[in-house]
Image: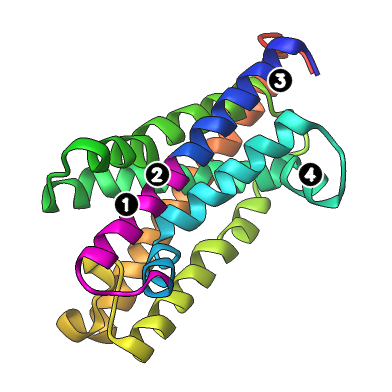
Amino acid sequence: MANRTRAFSTTAALFGWFALTLQLILTIQLAVDNGRSVPAALWQWIGYFTITTNVLVALALTASALGQRGAKSKFFGRPDVHSMIAMSIVIVSLIYNLLLRQLWHPQGWHLLADVLMHDVMPLLFVLHWWLVMPKASLHWRQVGAWQVYPAAYFLYALARGALNGWYPYPFLDVPTLGYGQVLINAVVILLAFVAVGLALVALARQQTRRGPKAFER
């Protein structure tokens, strides 16, 4: 891997892990201030699609920075896995900025964590996907397989909510909306995932035809 490619991957990975660590610290601090336990804070932290996806982003960037050094690195370095993560982090940014940003107004460190997780990391990862990741092996049919992750998260969020009554996002709030409306919301969002995935494959095919040489591997 060229030095500048490794430097970009490493820098982006460090930003990713910093953002996750900062958000975790803030979540724990807020929980303790409200009389809740650290395990409860951790359980809430991992309940957000934003968090699980940013973890995948940081792992993929770390794998790219370290190179093919093991099964995990090889897995996260695969173009299809990398593209699935790119699709997911784009949706994180779109949904947050279009539907959720107006629901709260963070300040200070909370604002920094918010911007890093929803704006900076999506941009860095998509740039990494575009500049670093080889894409000749991507195919349209892979987009369907990429939906396993968001579908699994949806079932996970509903199961958590059924157990403790907590739903991470307003459009998944079963007590308020009912299962019917939540299912409709999920289908609409899933279609957005598919649309972004197809757009990424289209961009990948276009880039492959042009033979980019921005970053040499």
For the residues labelled 1 and 2, say whether their Cβ atoms are less than 8 Å apart. yes
Q: Residues within 10 Å of mark 3 (few under 14, many from 20)?
A: many
Which one is closest to the eye, mark 2 or mark 3? 2
Rounded to the nearest angstrom, the CA distance separating label 3 from label 1 is 30 Å
The secondary structure that most of the magenta stretch takes on is helix
Q: Which mark is residue 73?
A: 4
Residue at the disc numbered 2: 22
Q: Say which element carries label 1.
A: helix
- As for residue 30 lying within the magenta part, the answer is yes
Query: Looking at the picture, which amino acid does disc 3 mark?
Result: Arg
**Gap between marks 1 and 2 measured at Cα:** 6 Å
Question: Which residue occupies the extreme bottom position in the image?
Answer: 163
Instruction: Give the residues in magenta.
Output: 19-38
Q: Amino acid at mark 4?
A: Ser
| Sequence-earlier tag: 3 or 1 | 3
Q: Which residue type carries mark 1?
A: Leu
> Which is more N-terminal, label 1 or label 4?
1
Distance between mark 2 and mark 4 Cα atoms: 24 Å
To which residue does mark 3 refer? 6
Q: Looking at the image, which residue is at 67% across and 52% down?
A: 142
Could you tell me which residue is drawn at 40 percent across and 63 percent down?
45
